[in-house]
Image (cartoon, coloured by chain):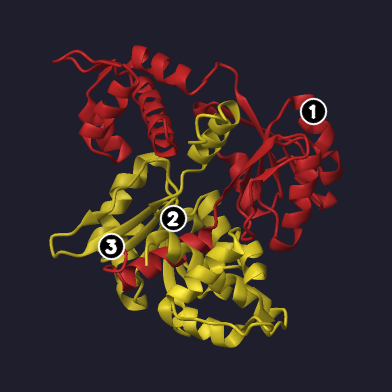
Chain colours: A red, B yellow
Amino acid sequence: MNNEMVIRITRYYRILNRLRSLGLEKVFAHNLADAAGVSAAIVRKDFSLLSIYGQKRGGYEIPELMTKLGSILGKTDKLEHVIIVGCGRIGRALMHYTGFEQDGIKVVAGFDSDPSIYNDPNHPVPVYPTSRIEDVVKESDTKVAIVTVPETATADTFQRLLSAGIQGVLNFSPITLKPIKKADGTQVIVHNVNIALELEQIFYELQSPNILQQ
Amino acid sequence: MNNEMVIRITRYYRILNRLRSLGLEKVFAHNLADAAGVSAAIVRKDFSLLSIYGQKRGGYEIPELMTKLGSILGKTDKLEHVIIVGCGRIGRALMHYTGFEQDGIKVVAGFDSDPSIYNDPNHPVPVYPTSRIEDVVKESDTKVAIVTVPETATADTFQRLLSAGIQGVLNFSPITLKPIKKADGTQVIVHNVNIALELEQIFYELQSPNILQQ
């Protein structure tokens, strides 16, 4: 199973979760395809690689399909914990984002270097000084951190997260972080989301549509 | 030039911009490589494909390099305009983001269906009702929109943006939008940034590191 396929399976699972919460019981490959932005042939091929087969006229049973895809994705009923480091506007927006829970993700705490925001009752989760990252990560069994600190604090924050035992980072800072292998052999996974870069690529594609056709 | 290479060139350009603002005049391929998260060999290969050559011991002149990469990327001194549709927490955070301008991007306006926020003096740019999208897009010559509306409003928002003449969309809603070809033959570019999905992929990679090795 390659990375692209994992992304598609994760998408299917999320779409099924939404369809189920709307009360649907069955789904066709072409519905999933439409919602996931791929062709129905790809959905069928993915499922057939995973030995998942629907009924000819009825499509797939949503609960059964979710169980199968969920076990492939290692889904459990337990919520996955994340922390948010950097409680500026973006960090706070993510703290309040209500869509995580339906995808099995729970923000356990925020961290910031500015003491004035620790006791703000508007935060939906506690906000602690960055010196407490290690304690909280251990107590809450958290493996993944979202980094929303300013550029200048990114490198230090990354080091601190590694020492605290964090194994995966979703980085929103404009500084690109690299996946690294720690001294103990653990691979730390990093995904960088650079919003300005995404916009620049769109502008680039708009002005030179043919170059990308290759 | 393929998509991956465009992404790298855009990264190099942004890094150079930052180095220049720190007062640096020259840069080595390995510095750029470190900052961009690639190997120095890749930087040299990219530059050689673009017929850009450094001096053996001195590296590359930053202003010269920026001019060359900038012309490849179609950079002008003019700021590229974007609008933000959906002024919830994420939309407002992006409205206040100060990093866009140094990448040549300017947020010209926000749009929301909630009239109570139109006259909030804290917004750094004007916020209008969504019915005004078409006017503002035309007046301000805006081609790209950031979509930060709730799931249920995503499809309608996309249609409205297409009718208004928007050609590129950066979509933060959990609903995946698909690039489409309009009736007049224009290709509309869509980039989807799904934060929960990014996190889920990290969790997936953490639990099954070997599957992704291939």
The residue beneath circle 3 is A214
Residue B110, quarter of picture: bottom left
Q: Do marks 1 and 3 both belong to one polypeptide chain?
A: yes
**Lower sequence index among marks 1 and 3:** 1
Q: In 3D space, how far apart are the residues under numbered discs 2 and 1 (Cα atoms)?
A: 45 Å
Percent across and percent down for residue B86 are 44, 53
User: Of circles 1 and 3, which is in front?
Assistant: 3
Percent across and percent down for residue A185 are 72, 35
Q: What residue type is labelled 3?
A: Gln
Q: What residue type is labelled 2?
A: Pro
Q: Compare residues A76 and A87 and report the one nearer the observer.
A: A76
Residue at the outermost front position: B56
In percent of the image, x 82 and y 45: which residue is there? Answer: A130
Q: In 3D space, how far apart are the residues under numbered discs 3 and 2 (Cα atoms)?
A: 46 Å
Secondary structure found at label 2: helix
Q: Compare residues A59 and B127 and report the one nearer the observer.
A: A59
Give me the disc on residue B115: 2
Percent across and percent down for residue B82 are 42, 68
Q: Do marks 2 and 1 both belong to one polypeptide chain?
A: no
In percent of the image, x 59 and y 63: which residue is there? Answer: B97
Bin the neighbour count of mark 3 within 10 Å (Cα to Cα): few under 14, some 14-19, many 20 and up.
few
In percent of the image, x 72 and y 79: which residue is there? Answer: B22
Q: Mark 1 lies on which chain?
A: A
Give me the disc on residue A138: 1
Q: Cβ–Cβ below 8 Å for labels 2 and 1?
A: no
